[in-house]
Image (cartoon, grey):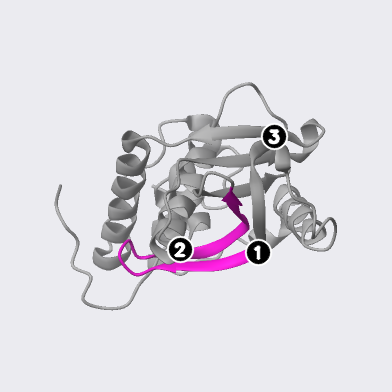
Amino acid sequence: MEKINTTYSISITPSEVLEYLFCPRFIYFMEVLKISQHEDKRFKVIKGREVHEKKTKINIEYLRKKIGVVKKEISVYLKSDEHRIRGIVDEVLTLSDGTMAPMEYKFAEYKKYLYRTYRTQLTLQALMIKENYLKEVLHGFIVFTRSRNFLLKVPFGKSDFDSALKVLDEILKIVQTGYYPKKTSHKTKCIDCCYKNICV
């Protein structure tokens, strides 16, 4: 895999990774051309932020002992210099077996399968936890608030970490070199895309 020159300071957020996975050209328009998508006006984004804000104010002392939680930290800002990522983790959990885990709250329904975006976001958070806390991270958790707060345990394997790091390299290539990537192959994503009029 070709390594990207990282001689100047740049780091990627999990949110930018999610945008890339939706369509690689989002990163080009947002980070290279600096054209905002005005995401603050999107309903799901607004509701998602409300959910996160609410969770920081209620049940602060509550520990999910059924999954072995002995300690939790809420809305933790983490940064990985090694992997050039930064972001806020909804909850950083310390488990009874000595490992740690990220937990994310999603304003979404559980559809009995896990989107690649969710798995990649958790995996990146796991990388940041491992680097900052020097603890093993074997899995993460997602709470689907629109499915009665259904809790999903997501195990991590080597392929998850390899895939997440590959995505980071691809994003860095776009940002640092101005590379214009191929658009998504899913045409339905283009229908209400804010960049469709300039995406050629």
Q: What element carries label 2?
A: helix
Q: Does residue 69 show up magenta in the picture? A: no
Q: Does residue 78 show up magenta in the picture? A: yes
Q: Is residue 4 left or right of 152 when viewed as pictured?
A: left
Amino acid found under the numbered disc labelled 1: Ser
User: Magenta stretch mostly in which secondary structure?
Assistant: strand
From the image, state whether disc 2 or disc 1 is nearer to you.
Answer: 2
Q: What element carries label 1?
A: strand
C-alpha gap between disc 3 and disc 1: 18 Å
Q: Which of 19 and 183 is in front in this view?
A: 19
Q: Is residue 39 visible?
A: yes
Image marks 3 and 2: residues in contact by CB distance under 8 Å: no
Other residues around mark 2 within 10 Å, as few (<14) / some (14–19) / many (≥20) = few
Disc 2: which residue: 133
Residue ranking furthest to the right:
58
Q: Is residue 181 visible?
A: no
Image spot of residue 79 (x, y percent): 44, 68
| Mark positioned earlier in the residue sequence (3 or 1) | 1
Image spot of residue 106 (x, y percent): 69, 44
Disc 3: which residue: 151
Tell me how many marks there are: 3
Amino acid found under the numbered disc labelled 3: Leu
Q: In which quarter of the image is residue 180?
A: bottom left
